[in-house]
Image (cartoon, rainbow, N blue to C red):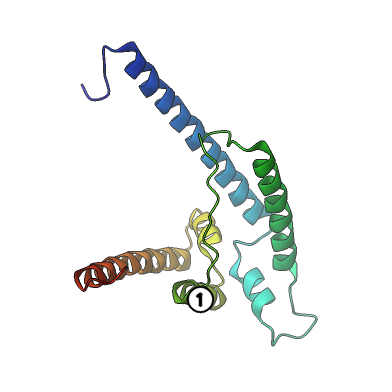
Amino acid sequence: MFGESNDPATSASFASLSRASLYRNIAAFAVGLVFALGLGIAEMTQPARVIGFLDITASRAAWDPTLAFVMIGALAMYALAYRLALGRGVPVFSQILEIPTRRDIDRRLIGGAVLFGVGWGLSGFCPGPALTSLSAGNGAVAVFIAAMTAGMWLHGALDRTLVRTATAAGAAP
């Protein structure tokens, strides 16, 4: 059967891999649950909150700064967690600490940021709150999730096509 072995060393490594994978998945679920609860408590699953912050034409009395406080809190928590992770050197559920090394700003990054911002401003949803709001059974959220999924699929298909075309032409992807 797949994954079975009579070699004790191999069996131990499969058990270790399985246990590590289970712990990573439990940790990912716990983090996602805390994230979803935070979004719900801060009412960031309500598009009116987000649009109330992003609408710069609203009067001072109508402007909603809640999103700014949520972002400041999130950045503070991230900064603390990042420093702790760097100080520890080794992740809790992995063998190596993977920190992105890429620092350039290219067209893809700018285009993605603009597309994300426009979609967020028009709909009042970004992916996390939309997935959290999906549990409420709101049809508009389901349409947003479907459109977001289609957009991600389309991006992947176009990206693969562009890489194949560039590779065939001898250029670096």
Looking at the rendered structure, the secondary structure element under dot 1 is: helix
30 left or right, relative to 78: left
91 left or right, relative to 151: right
| Amino acid at pointer 1 | Ile
The residue shown at (54%, 68%) is 125
Query: Relative to residue 58, is residue 149 depicted above or below?
Result: above
Residue situated in front as seen by the camera: 136 or 166: 166
The residue shown at (68%, 46%) is 81
Residue 25 percent coordinates (x, y): 48, 37
Counting the numbered discs, the total is: 1
Query: Relative to residue 83, is residue 104 depicted above or below?
Result: below
Q: Residue furthest bottom?
A: 57
Kindly identify which residue carries mark 1. Answer: 110
In which image quadrant can residue 61 be found? Answer: bottom right
Residue 19 percent coordinates (x, y): 45, 25
Query: Relative to residue 9, is residue 121 depicted above or below?
Result: below
Residue 160 percent coordinates (x, y): 27, 65
Query: Relative to residue 169, is residue 60 depicted above or below?
Result: below
Residue 16 percent coordinates (x, y): 43, 23
In which image quadrant can residue 9 be found? Answer: top left
Q: Residue furthest front?
A: 170
The residue shown at (70%, 58%) is 75
Name the image quarter holding the N terminus.
top left
The residue shown at (38%, 21%) is 13
Other-residue count near label 1 (Cα within 10 Å), few / some / many at <14 / 14–19 / ≥20: few
129 left or right, relative to 146: right
Name the image quarter holding the C terminus.
bottom left
